[in-house]
């Protein structure tokens, strides 16, 4: 894990990342919204949060862009965003709250054999260069011998992690693929609203496959798209948020999208693609492969994260994202500031850890993300 010097310097003195919170004497309802990627995680975490704190926050996850706007307008007390706010208001801070993999989700009809894709092929599909499932690149990806990573596990079956929070690797195993896909048109679902998920996908594609995806990352998929997306209306279909694109793929056989992996589960029942990373290994998007990528990231002293998409860690998933909590250093009310501070600490520390099925990485105490989160959290309400 790489971190800036200032983050390392606070390691010994920063706030403890685990806070035992007593239930509030008077329940408070916070106004929170933003990234749709954390909708399922917030829903899974809500009950325990209410029991622990006595507070509530009816999370309104309609998109990272909406979260930024809501915080700026004062209609939200705090927001979640999967991308950096490039035009922050005075006193706004970024807290790296969650790490997670952007899954490539596919409706393969009755075919349950799974699918393996290289980053070059993914760039080709989402740029419109690859239009059929029997394309020669997709055929090559799924008819080869691939190496997969096997993690070290504890007696309880949980993966062993390093102090920096990355999974420990036991070995790699070879698997020979023989999978020919049909001559079916590929339908791509993308986000129409400003989305941090779009930002993270397009940022990775621009770094990994710049000849196919030459445009810079953007919250707007259509803006970052290499060509004119309006000319591909028959095969490129837009939808608003995470659930919307998942619903679109669910209803359209042989379609594909990019989404949080929890949206592959029921009621959507989608296939999650394995992706060939920069080390040449076939990896599934998971909390462990996301944390392997996080271990190679750089965390700045202001809490913002830069992923090294070309890192050669065998377990690293190439499309890994950070969800930031966007908050203020001054709420004009010490009681309110204290409540929001406790809320954000609880969510970042407990939600991913207590709900592993959602696919979000759980921080270790020595992890640079947790150190930066605590450092930024200390500024809240100051």
Image (spheres, rainbow, N blue to C red):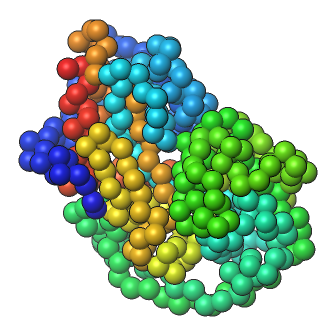
Image point 68% across, 81% down: which residue? Answer: 141
Instruction: Name which quarter of the figure residue 155 lies in.
Output: bottom left
Q: Is residue 13 visible?
A: yes
Q: Is residue 238 left or right of residue 299?
A: right
Residue 58 in the image, given as x and y percentages of width and height: 51, 23
Compared to residue 344, the image places residue 317 above or below, namely below
Q: Is residue 23 visible?
A: no
Q: Nearer the viewer, residue 105 or 134?
A: 134
Q: Is residue 211 left or right of residue 56?
A: right
Residue 106 in the image, given as x and y percentages of width and height: 72, 61
Q: Nearer the viewer, residue 70 or 37?
A: 70
Q: Nearer the viewer, residue 365 or 64?
A: 64
Point out the image quarter for the C terminus.
top left
Compared to residue 32, the image places residue 132 above or below, namely below
Q: Looking at this view, name the residue that lies furthest to the left.
A: 12
Q: Is residue 334 left or right of residue 73?
A: left
Point out the image quarter for the N terminus.
bottom left
Instruction: Name which quarter of the figure residue 186 lies in.
Output: bottom right
Image point 68% across, 43% down: which residue? Answer: 223
Residue 286 in the image, given as x and y percentages of width and height: 49, 61
Residue 217 in the image, given as x and y percentages of width and height: 57, 49
Image point 52% across, 27% down: which residue? Answer: 67
Compared to residue 241, the image places residue 331 above or below, namely above
Q: Nearer the viewer, residue 133 or 45?
A: 133
Image point 63% across, 59% down: which residue? Answer: 214
């Amino acid at each position: 894990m790489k971190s800036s010097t200032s983050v390392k310097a606070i390691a010994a003195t920063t706030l403890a990342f685990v806070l035992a919170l007593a239930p509030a004497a008077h329940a408070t309802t916070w106004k929170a919204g933003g990234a749709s990627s954390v909708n399922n995680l917030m829903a899974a975490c809500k009950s325990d949060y209410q029991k622990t704190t006595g507070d509530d926050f009816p999370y309104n996850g309609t998109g990272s862009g909406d979260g930024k706007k809501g915080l700026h307008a004062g209609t939200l007390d705090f927001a979640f965003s999967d991308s950096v706010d490039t035009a922050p208001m005075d006193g706004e801070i970024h807290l790296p709250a969650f790490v997670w993999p952007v899954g490539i989700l596919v409706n393969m009809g009755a075919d349950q054999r799974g699918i393996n894709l290289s980053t070059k092929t993914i760039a080709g599909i989402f740029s419109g260069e690859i239009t059929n499932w029997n394309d020669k690149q997709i055929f090559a990806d799924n008819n080869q011998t691939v190496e997969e990573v096997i993690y070290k596990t504890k007696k309880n079956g949980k993966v062993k992690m390093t102090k920096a929070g990355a999974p420990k690797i036991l070995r790699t195993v070879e698997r020979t693929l023989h999978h020919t896909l049909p001559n079916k048109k590929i339908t791509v679902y993308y986000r129409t609203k400003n989305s941090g998920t779009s930002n993270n996908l397009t940022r990775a594609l621009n770094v990994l496959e710049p000849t196919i995806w030459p445009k810079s990352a953007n919250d707007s998929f259509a803006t970052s798209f290499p060509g004119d997306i309006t000319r591909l209306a028959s095969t490129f279909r837009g939808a608003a948020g995470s659930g919307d694109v998942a619903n679109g793929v669910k209803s359209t056989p042989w379609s594909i999208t990019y989404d949080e992996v929890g949206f592959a589960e029921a009621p959507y029942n989608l296939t999650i693609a394995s992706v060939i990373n920069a080390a040449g290994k076939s990896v599934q998007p998971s909390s462990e492969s996301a944390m392997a990528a996080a271990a190679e990231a750089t965390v700045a002293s202001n809490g913002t994260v830069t992923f090294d998409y070309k890192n050669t860690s065998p377990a690293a998933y190439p499309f890994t994202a950070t969800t930031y909590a966007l908050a203020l250093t001054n709420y004009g009310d010490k009681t309110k500031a204290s409540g929001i501070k406790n809320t954000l600490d609880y969510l970042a520390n407990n939600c991913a850890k207590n709900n592993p099925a959602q696919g979000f990485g759980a921080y270790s105490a020595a992890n640079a993300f947790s150190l930066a989160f605590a450092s930024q959290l200390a500024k809240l309400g100051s």
